[in-house]
Image (cartoon, rainbow, N blue to C red):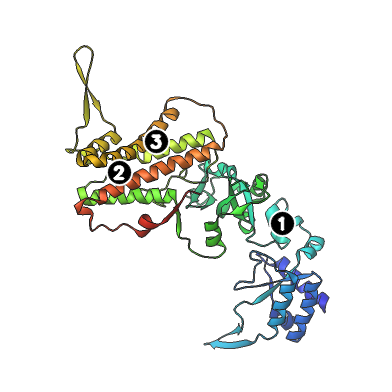
Amino acid sequence: MKKEIEKKVYDFFVKSNDFNGIPLRQISDDLNIEYEKSIDLIKNLVQNDRITIQSSSNPHIIYSRLYPIDIQLKILEDAKSWTVTTKKFGEISYSIESSDFPICLYPSPKMLTSDRNLDEFGEAIYSKALALAEPQLSPRFFEIEVLERYVNDPRFNFKFQDYSGRISAKYDENEKPLVRDEDDVFLKTFGLGFDENENRLAVVYLRYLSDLTPEHQIYWKNKERFGECKVLEEYYENTIKGNWTSSYSIFSAFIGELTCLNNLAQTIFSKQLFRKDYDEHNRPKEFTFFFTPTLKNYEDFVLLLDKMISDNINKDFFKDKVEFYDIVELKNGMVERKSKGTLRLMEDWLGGIFKAEQNNELKKLFKQLKEIRRERQNPAHKISENEYDKKYIELQKQLINKAYHSIKGLRHIFQQHPLAKDIEIPDWIENGNVKTF
């Protein structure tokens, strides 16, 4: 009878579409065994490491871990007291077990390793891991540059939030992929992780890696990292525990401040200070922590940040508020009109409004914005050979911090206007836990 149970558990798992386990009571029902006796037989198979169990609100997949054998035995023993209630809803009957954490049975990894033929999976490395009963939400860690293949190819959608993202191939108007079949991938979610030295890594759960084509599974495998790696707490809380996190990335906070500042300007002066707002639907893909530390990526980030600030300032906002030109005397006694840049226009306007004791605060704020503008000059005016250096991670952090605190400072200035007293700033903008991961 134990052999029959073992075979039934094995066959159910192997033939399932999603590496599923067979419900505990199905064993006694299908093999016509008394329920408690079936549990004793299953406990013996667990003890001999032929079967393993999952008990949770969703035991039909091996979720994030395998239980130690002694815990499995206790859960099975407790299950002997569980009862089943049958209820009817019209013509439909259904059964409810008296536990919130039902049990499903799986062949053990030891059994599968020795008995299962994996030829059907070919080169699909991560699919093979699931076929050997590895937990579906066990994390795998990768060098951050694994994402470059998708970021730099316009045939892929590369979407992300603060600390997670997704990847998919693009389709044409006839619903055909723009890439060859081997590249028609969909990665439902990836997140941010770190190695033992706090270097950023990409992290993906095994279940989602198995959805990649075999070719892409091999590609990811070649970038995999081992050792003392960890998942970012916010990503873990959101994906494994199902909790909303109360922290926000500095990138989201910057965009939020920019939007609030624009709303304040529109309400007070009936004109937008910035020509364009950003949100989750039009957030530039380079505006992220998923950043390979190369000179090219850093220079691209500098250009982007300056475009979101200096190049985005609406010159028309300052019409009739400040002079748009400087008059410069030339050597021959002639004079030349030189246009002021957008940062200069804003600084002149605010400088004329602020009291003298507030000017130091204003100078610090514009100093940071001008530093971002100056940092843009290198990529804009010279050709540099690309290089890989982890210093660019810190430089990126410094730059986004300058941008965030400057825009936040401007938002506080606008809030002091009498017409701003009834404008409500979102609590997460004002008091949120902003992090630079």
The first of marks 2 and 1 along the sequence is 1
- State the image coordinates of residue 77 (x, y, percent, origin top left): 72, 81
The first of marks 1 and 3 along the sequence is 1
Which element is circle 3 on?
Answer: helix
| Residue marked by disc 2 | 274
Is there a contact, CB below 8 Å, between mark 3 and mark 2? no
Circle number at residue 128: 1
Q: CA distance from mark 2 to mark 1?
A: 52 Å
Disc 3 crowd, CA 10 A, few/some/many (<14, 14-19, 20+): many
Viewer-nearest of discs 3 and 2: 3
| Residue marked by disc 3 | 372
**Furthest-top residue in this view:** 332
Which element is circle 2 on?
Answer: loop
In percent of the image, x 40 and y 41: which residue is there? 402
Query: The N terminus is located in which quarter?
Result: bottom right
On screen, residue 21 above or below 78: above
Which element is circle 1 on?
Answer: helix
395 relative to 359 in the view: left or right: right
- State the image coordinates of residue 386 (x, y, percent, origin top left): 54, 30
Q: Amino acid at mark 2?
A: Phe
351 relative to 85 in the view: left or right: left
Residue 421 visible in the shown view: yes
Q: CA distance from mark 1 to mark 3?
A: 48 Å
The answer to which of 92 and 6 lies nearer the viewer is: 6
Circle number at residue 193: none
- State the image coordinates of residue 174 (x, y, percent, origin top left): 49, 50
